[in-house]
Image (cartoon, rainbow, N blue to C red):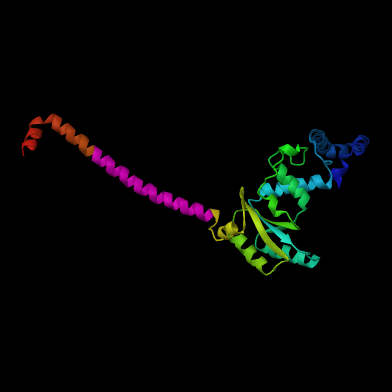
Amino acid sequence: MLPLLFRNPVVVSRLSFASPLIASRFASTTVERNAVDAIRKTVKPVDSRKTFLIDTYKHLMEKNPVMLFCHHNNLTKGENAHFREEINKVGGKLTILRNNLFQVYLRNAQNTDPAAPIRRSEQNWKHPLLPFFKGPTAAISFSETDPAKVKKVMKLLEKAQDKLFIIGAKVENDAYDMRQLSTFKDLPTKTQMQSELLGLLHVLSGAGLVQTLEAGSNMLYLTLKSHEDNINPNKKEGDEEN
């Protein structure tokens, strides 16, 4: 609540009459926030609910490499709490989305500030995730790329039937349909794949070292043989006659 109050010029002006302690306590915050509000141009007011949600969706998409998009069907308060708790247990986080605002974010995601005024012709109307938003939608986010966690959530939601079901996903920078997601969930983790790759490189580097040493030995032999022939040409002629 305080941050919103200090955006108000009336409140800011009243700070000048406050005690030195209070004034010094909030001076930097007030100046910074007023500077941001003066520079940032948004379709809706900076402190509005709609701008806040678009900012939230931007953070959600940029900070979570894996997101499962689901349709939900008339979830009761108890069902909502149940799914949130169960999904949290396996490492995910459930967020109910406002479709129209998430679509605004997707169309403007290529811009630094998706909440800013952007011409219709400059918006991305072919974003690959837009087709997922044709009904009440939720997102399950993961802070790391871990197929095992995705697999656990998919198994969990099999019991939910039509109450909450997955329709697609974002994995890193790609949009996945259900077929691709089914393949992804059975993959090893990124850490496991990196370990396997390092092991493979170690083996290959060992084989390469042997080849290099063998090549070096052969080259050394040929060089010494050439010097020997130059030093003792009679021996070379004798070898050729034999």
Q: Is residue 139 magenta?
A: no
* Image quadrant where one finds the C terminus: top left
| Magenta segment boundaries in residue numbering | 191-219
Q: Name the foreground residue: 2 vs 41.
A: 41
Q: Nearer the viewer, residue 203 or 78?
A: 78
Considering the whole magenta stretch, tell me its main secondary structure: helix
Residue 181's spot in the image, x, y percent?
A: 60, 58
Which residue occupies the extreme bottom position in the image? 159
Residue at (76%, 36%) from the top-left corner? 119
Q: Eyeballing the image, is 87 above or below 113?
A: below
Q: Position of residue 79 (x, y in %)?
A: 76, 67
Q: What's the residue at 72%, 54% (across, down)?
A: 133
- Numbered-mark total: 0
Residue 151 occupies quadrant: bottom right
Task: Out of 204 and 41, give the one closest to the viewer.
Answer: 41
From this view, report whether residue 188 is shown above or below residue 15: below
Q: Residue at x 86, y 39 (%)?
A: 7
- From what the image shows, is residue 139 above or below residue 118? below
Q: Is residue 209 magenta?
A: yes
Location of residue 203 in the rendering, given as x and y in whole percent from the top left corner: 39, 51
For residue 12, what is the image quadrant? top right
